[in-house]
Amino acid sequence: MNEEIAFILDASKESMDAAITHLEKEFIKIRAGKASPAMLSSVMVEYYGSLTPLSQVANINTPDGRTLSVQPWEKAMLQEIEKAIMNANLGFNPMNNGDFVIINVPPLTEERRLQLAKQARAEAEHAKVGVRNARQEANKEIRDLDASEDLQKNAELDIQDLTDKFTKKIEDFFAAKEAEIMKV
C-alpha cells in the first residue's frame, strides 16, 4: 500500500516539476532589457514551402546587449527571415545589410515593462494551475486506493506540502523575473 502512495507522490512531484520547467521556458521568451537569441524562438520562417523555426535556417547571435544578428545559411533566405521577424509581432524592426539581418533591441518603455510583467504573472498563474491539477489528480488517486482513512489523510497532507513547496517556488521565480523586467 505504501508503495502505491509513494508512486502517486512521485508522479505528482514529476507533474509539478514539469509545470516549473515549462514556466522557465516561457520566462526565457519574455525579454527583460538585454538581447537574447531566445527572443526569436517563436519566429517561424517559410522555408521551401513549410514553416520552420528560425534557429533551423540561420545562426542567431548577440554581438552586444542591444543587438541581435541573424545570419542565414542561404543568402536567398534574407528577405523571408526579415518578413518572418516582422510578422512575429515582437516589436522589432529588422534591417537587412545583404549578409545579415540585424535587429536593434529597443530599450523597454515603462508601459511595455508593465505588459511584460503582466505576461509573466499570467505564465506564473498557468504554472500554479498545473501544480494544483497535479495535486487534484494525486488526491483523487489516493481516495481511489483501498487504504485506511488515516493513511489517505497523511498522503493528502504530503501532497499538500508538495503543492505548497512548488507554489512558493513559482512565486519566488516570478518575483525574480518581475524584478528583472522592471529594472531600468
Image (cartoon, helix red, strand yellow):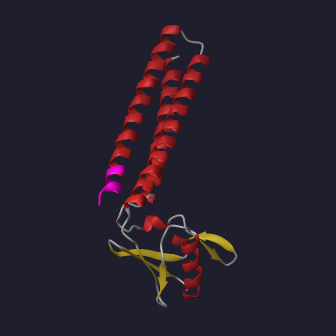
Q: How many marks?
A: 0
Q: Residue 125 in the image: x percent, y percent?
A: 48, 41
Name the residue at the left extreme. Answer: 184
Say whether residue 49 is left or right of residue 164.
right
Q: Is residue 49 above or below residue 79?
A: above
Q: Residue 24 in the image: x percent, y percent?
A: 43, 50
Comparing 95 with 111, the one in front is 111
Say whether residue 149 is left or right of residue 114.
right
Q: Is residue 152 above or below residue 104?
A: above
Tell me which corner region of the image, top left, top right, bottom left or bottom right, holds residue 113: bottom left
Say whether residue 107 is left or right of residue 96.
left
Q: Is residue 63 above or below residue 174?
A: below
Is residue 21 magenta-colored? no
Comparing 152 with 108, the one in front is 108
Q: Is residue 138 above or below residue 127?
A: above
Name the residue at the bottom extreme. Answer: 98
Q: Residue at x 51, y 77 (%)?
A: 58
Name the image quarter holding the C terminus. bottom left
Name the residue at the front extreme. Answer: 111
Q: Residue at x 50, y 65 (%)?
A: 41
Please provide the residue range marked out in magenta. Answer: 178-184
Q: Residue at x 64, y 70 (%)?
A: 51
Comparing 37 with 6, the one in front is 37
Is residue 180 magenta-colored? yes
Secondary structure that dominates the magenta span:
helix
Q: Residue at x 33, y 55 (%)?
A: 182
Tell me which corner region of the image, top left, top right, bottom left or bottom right, holds residue 66: bottom left
Q: Residue 76 in the image: x percent, y percent?
A: 58, 87
